[in-house]
Amino acid sequence: MFHGLRWRVVVPYVILVLVGVAGLIFYLSGLAREILMADLERRLVAEAHLARDALTLPLSEGESMDDQARRYGAMLDMRVTLIRADGLVLGESHGDPSQVADDAMQPEIRQARLDDLGRDVRFSAILGGEALYVAVPLRVNGQLAGFVRLAIPLEWIERRIGRLRRGILAIGLFMSLAAAALGLFVAERTARPVRDLTGVVRRMTEGDMNSRLLPTSRDEIGSLTGAFNRMADQLRITINRLARERSRLAGVLDNMADGVLITDEEARVSLINPAAARLLGTTEERALGTSFAQAVRDHRIIDLWRQCREKGQEAVQSVELDRREVFLQVIVTPLEGAETDAYLVILQDLTRVRRLEMVRRDFISNISHELRTPLASLKALVDTLREEEPIVEASAAQHFLDLMETEVDALTQMVRELLELSRIESGKAPFRLERVAVSDVADPPVERLRPQAERGGLDLTVHVPSDLPPILADEERMRQVVTNLVHNAIKFTPAGGRIEVAARGFHVAPDGSSDLQALSPDHDLDSGKWVLISVRDTGIGIPAEDLERIFERFYKADRARSGGGTGLGMAIAKHIVQGHGGRIWVESVEGEGSTFYVAIPALTFR
């Protein structure tokens, strides 16, 4: 209650006035006591001299001093005592002289004997309180005959001093109230702009950076208000700049392909971007505030972080997360300039790079394998024909030449397909796009390959509704896609199996949803109308680990590579479909069969 600014002003005012009044009361009380005592003492001295002069004659004539003392005591309204020189009390106005003790040794008597005037202040049992005593010598014929002593209680002095104190105290209280009122007025004038300024600060802390206070005076408070407004303007500019920089930094971190983590001095995650959360298989909400070990859950990354902390320098290591087949390059760096020990952890996803490197190695291995067989055959046949003494007859030589021609044709076909694939990938093979019916794309390849399917004991069917919308496509190249898919199905389907070529239309909504069950949730198809061509077989199927690589050049799920073919058909089909703005994918269960899907944008639905 008394911690506000107004009370800090009012309370000292009141205390100062009260201390002043107390000091004034103390000083004036002492001064008044001294003045009144001096005045009273002069009165008693004067009265004592008068009484001495009046009692000298009665004392010399032997009259009763007790009656004289009572008469003068009543007349002066004070105690009058007549004492003989030897200390015997001759008369007492307030009691029986015979019962009064010998007063010869009282201080005022001893002093009067020496200085003709004696005084003392002490407690009087007869008067019932503190009293002022004054004594003067009484002489008869020049000889000391006794003393006249007057005594008066000091109660009336205390009463007067009490009235003085009460008056001063009343004035002091009035001045205290006036000081309190004045202090409240001054404090209110001073505290009002401070309260207003506090309200502005509170609104600013709540986010209202445009709140300001107009100066109402030219004093220090007005200067403070102006300085605060300038500070608020500068602070708003700084906060806006920091917010923009933070927004840009957040945008960079959120869209970075590399994962970024920052740990504090307690090894807790203070920052993690979406890429790092994705790579580590967690979420930002779960990772923030947890320990680094709990967030990464990989002892190699944890050991690398500890190594960086112990050595105080950057640490780099490649780590493969076995649980998700993710290959990372982890870089841990101490953050320089941070107030506390903080470390920056960068997770570079090299999975695609490593996969491309694997594809490159497999490509070289596969093409080497594909070329080695025909080249070895050609080499053997050529060496046989070059022998000086041929061991073969003319008919056999002709057979060798036919075999050589077959191998050369295989090499030529392989080179032709490689060149075709290269042209399609580089965009140098333009598509002649035109309005094409889906049946014109699916039926001819099926009919051309039907004899081959019948020789293999396979049931080949086609189901293409007549009401499907047309597509914008290069008819020959799309036929090539269907041919490759059907030929691939015939090759890997045992006798007695079935192959079905079908087509249907479907629609992709703007939110990405679709009525097509075969379409995966993470598809990248634009919203609109599409045509789906499917080739389903009951063949040997494709192992799950080969599904993602089935469309690579020279890649064969048959590790022994005994199935024939160049291994380029699926790669060519993929790039032709992508060139039409479509998508191709496969679903397969090993031992049960495979289904290849081709999605092509449709022109219109009928």
Image (spheres, grey):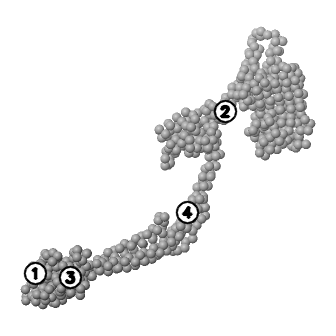
* Secondary structure of the residue carrying numbered label 3: loop
Residue receiving disc 4: 201
* Secondary structure of the residue carrying numbered label 2: helix
Three-letter amino acid code at the position of disc 2: Arg
Q: Looking at the image, is mark 3 or mark 2 nearer the viewer?
A: 3
* Secondary structure of the residue carrying numbered label 4: helix
Residue 424 appears in the picture as rendered: no
The image shows residue 222 at horizontal and vertical percentages of 52, 71
Residue receiving disc 1: 85
Residue 587 placement: quadrant: top right
Q: CA distance from mark 2 to mark 1?
A: 139 Å
**Left or right, residue 146 beside residue 583:** left
Three-letter amino acid code at the position of disc 3: Ser
Residue receiving disc 3: 93
Q: Looking at the image, is mark 4 or mark 1 nearer the viewer?
A: 1
**Left or right, residue 114 beside residue 513:** left
Classify mark 1: residues with Cα within 10 Å, few (<14), some (14-19) or many (20+): some
Tell me which numbered mark, 3 or 2, is placed earlier along the sequence.
Answer: 3
The answer to the question of whether label 2 and label 1 lie on touching residues, with beta carbons closer than 8 A, is no
Tell me which numbered mark, 4 or 2, is placed earlier along the sequence.
Answer: 4
Q: Is residue 357 above or below residue 145?
A: above
Classify mark 3: residues with Cα within 10 Å, few (<14), some (14-19) or many (20+): many
**Left or right, residue 392 beside residue 317:** right
